[in-house]
Image (spheres, rainbow, N blue to C red):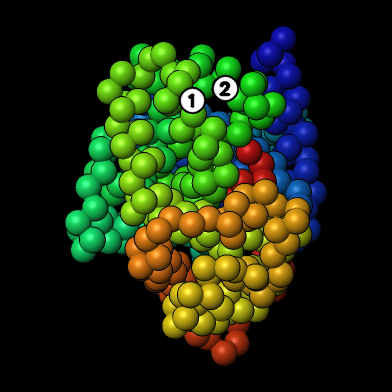
Amino acid sequence: MAYELGVITTIQLMERILGQNGPICLSWDATTVDGAHINEIHLTLNRSDCLTLDVRHIPGGKASDYVSHIVSSLTEAADTYSRYVGKPQQEIFHLLKTKISCTLSDRAAVNACVTRQLRDEFDSTLLQLNCNIHPLDSVARRAKQNLVKLDTRWEIKGSCFGSDGSATNLINAVSVLRFKDGSGDPAGFKDMLRRHNLPMGTFVRYVGNRMHVLFHLAGVIVLHYNKVMDFLQTRCTSGGLLRSRLLNDLKNDKIIAQVWALAVIGKVFTGPWMTKFYSSEMSNLDMRPLVKRCEQQLQLWLAEPDLLMTPTMNAFGEPLSPADDSVLTEILCFISGEDAVQMEALRVLIQACMDVLNSQLGIFIKDPEPSPICHSECSLCPHPQHGV
């Protein structure tokens, strides 16, 4: 029964694709789950219509692995549809290839290689577009690097395990405490959440550089700091060495000042970025003035980081509303006793945002006019997650 449903789904997908008059964007996105490299392939027909072609475990993350998955998935879809309509498979496959006019992926070098190899496979000039959500991964990575340097300058030594800097190690340790059996205390942590009438998903799992997670968790820790401290001091029954290390770092004002700074960036930059761009209603060209406005605001904050000690607007110039945001309210009330570290942390985090914007989205900031790209292609969604 599952096989028959798969065949019907493929036929429906092919009819949608071959009936499309405008350009079709091919996108892919991979992740590692329990050691397995899982790749998803999507076909975007317009701003909001995204179809999932295939999800598969592939051998690795090489360009040849992605190309093989993409070509085989398209070939299999063409073969299924050709049997349904009674036409040659080669004819359907050729028509399918001519419908695809561009690719959309993140800015990893391997994906540029994939697009080049697909151009050879399709014998066409595919336009390469880049996802404008994935730069947040790079922002998180650069932010962690800058905070490691800040630790060195201020001789800050955290107790929590890890090599990403004291603030990031603390955030990761809280995630371990919440989710990991053995080294953490998931049962006790969930009991603490229930006692305070907090949703089980209040503390999300920390997964490295993924988008806004680092900054979001920093804000949650600032908001629920006293609850976490009380849990560790009075109710945490397991966790062993992790418990004592977490207590040491949570009592370290210089480390908490950095966590606070990460939370601020989450409220003024990464959070609003996700809100603005994680939508199929906005095209790549629509994003241009927003990115330029964001860059200008970051320049202002870089020159005057003290403006972020009590932020009133986000990076897009929109007002912040503490009355509707408990995390923001706590940020504004926060006192660490380490103002100099707070200011320095804000400065290096703003610099991280600026560096990524200029390196990955410089075309939006520097070019006076958009590149001569087909507007219909640029009107496709700005990231490949819509089909996930």
Determine which quarter of the picture holds residue 241.
Answer: top left
| Residue 312 visible at all | yes
Mark 1 and 2 residues: CB-CB less than 8 Å, in contact? yes
Label 2 environment density (alpha carbons within 10 Å; few <14, some 14–19, many ≥20): some
Looking at numbered disc 1 in the image, what kind of residue is underneath it?
Answer: Phe
Residue 285 coordinates in the image, percent (x, y): 66, 73
Decide: is 27 above or below 382.
above
> Residue at left 51%, top 14%?
187
Upstream in the sequence, badge 1 or badge 2?
2
For the residue pair 199 and 32, the one nearer the viewer reads as 199
CA separation in Å, label 1 and label 2? 7 Å
Looking at numbered disc 2 in the image, what kind of residue is underneath it?
Answer: Met
- For the C terminus, the quadrant is top right
| Residue 118 visible at all | no
For the residue pair 30 and 73, the one nearer the viewer reads as 30
> Residue at left 32%, top 57%?
147
* SS type, badge 2: helix
For the residue pair 380 and 242, the one nearer the viewer reads as 242
> Residue at left 31%, top 61%?
146
Residue beneath disc 2:
192
Residue beneath disc 1:
231
- For the N terminus, the quadrant is top right
- The residue most toward the bottom is 368
